[in-house]
Amino acid sequence: MEPVCKVPIRNLFCLLSYANEMPELVESLNEVNEDLITYDFLAKQFLREVNVLKQRGIIRNYVAVTEETNRVGGRILMGESIPHIMARRASLVCEKDEYSEDILLNQIMKTILQGIVQNRYVKAETRQQSFLRLEALQGVSEVPLTTGMFTRLRLDRQNIRYQRMVHMARLLHELRLLSHQQGNWSLFSAKVTERALHQIFEKFLFHFYRLEQSVYKVSSEVMRWNLDGETKWLPTMRTDISMTNRNGQDKIIMDAKFYRNMFQENYGKASFHSHNLYQLYTYLMHQSREMRLRGILVYPFNGVEVNEVFRAGERMTMEVMTLNLDAPWQEIHNRLIMVVQA
């Protein structure tokens, strides 16, 4: 069975907010006691956004409707109509545009509301409020939600007021998915597989540093091997996070590694995972010799706090650090900012 990690909902919410490039959601909860940020609390924030939309009016748009009819209207779909013609039925299949509230944005809103109503672990009051909101969406269909569906959404001047609702809907959907992968549910914490959390952790760190500081330019860097020969057989070298100081003289290469155990054991001797160090060292060796370099491996805290620095001459260090994802969010934020200020 794949190893799982237990992460507080409040911190998973912050990680997902940055990973999905929505840091304003974290900022909007700055005045809230972190211990109060549970799944139920976030569901109520979603309901607040639904109320705002209801007061301003639900958006409608033209949607294509296909129907069998004996009155020609809209576009005749010949492929679908041929069986009717062959059977000498007095009907055709037509497609026409109807001005409807049954559009994707409203479908997402209804599906999340329905999910809250059916979640028996959410407070009865929250489920009741969600049920009441559903009454205003009787003409809207439910849809099976996917993460890709949110990625493909495009907001414009006509529907920009849906933005916060969509952001909250995406986070509730992803939190619910992550929690249910292990068959357990908690309002306060989620048990997440190492693989899923590694992907979130890597994206979180990338966007956190891109958005929370301005000294370094943040990118994911593809490097060429300093070797002659048939390079097509060589693996691609791509960093998780490359941060180049705007002075052009300092650079940080950061690799996010999400293992519950950062150590390997060989003949009774514990050491850091060798392949992680080899990989980071290779990245550093392919940088300009004129730059001051820092390579940093970031692991989640697992009971052993680590903050080790290994030096290679005056211009290069390799560092291994842990980040406690069970700590208050402000501590996590400050710890990460201190890394680039060192």
Image: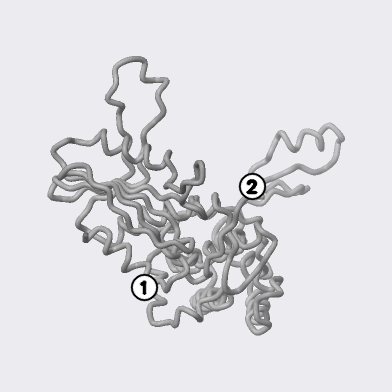
Q: Position of residue 166 (x, y in %)?
A: 50, 64
SS label for mark 1:
helix
In the rendered image, is residue 107 in sight? no
> Residue at image x 71%, y 71%?
118
Q: Residues within 10 Å of mark 2 (few under 14, many from 20)?
A: some
Q: Position of residue 224 (x, y in %)?
A: 30, 28
In the rendered image, is residue 263 in sight? yes
Along the viewing direction, whichever of 210 and 205 lies nearer the viewer: 205
Query: Which residue lies under the disc numbered 2?
Result: 74
Q: Which label sits in the foreground, 2 or 1?
A: 1
> Residue at image x 37%, y 47%?
255
Quadrant where the image shows the C terminus: bottom left
* Residue occupying the far bottom of the picture: 125
> Residue at image x 47%, y 54%?
200
Along the viewing direction, whichever of 153 and 118 lies nearer the viewer: 118
Task: Name the amino acid type tagged 1.
Answer: Gln
Query: Which residue lies under the disc numbered 1?
Result: 330
Q: Position of residue 104 (x, y in %)?
A: 57, 58
Q: Quadrant of residue 54?
A: bottom right
Q: Residues within 10 Å of mark 1 (few under 14, many from 20)?
A: few
> Residue at image x 45%, y 78%?
34
Specify which label sits upstream in the sequence, 2 or 1: 2
SS label for mark 2:
loop
Task: Name the amino acid type tagged 2.
Answer: Gly
Residue 335 sits above or below residue 240 on the image: below
Check contact, mark 2 vs mark 1: CB within 8 A.
no
Q: Which labelled disc corresponds to residue 70?
A: none
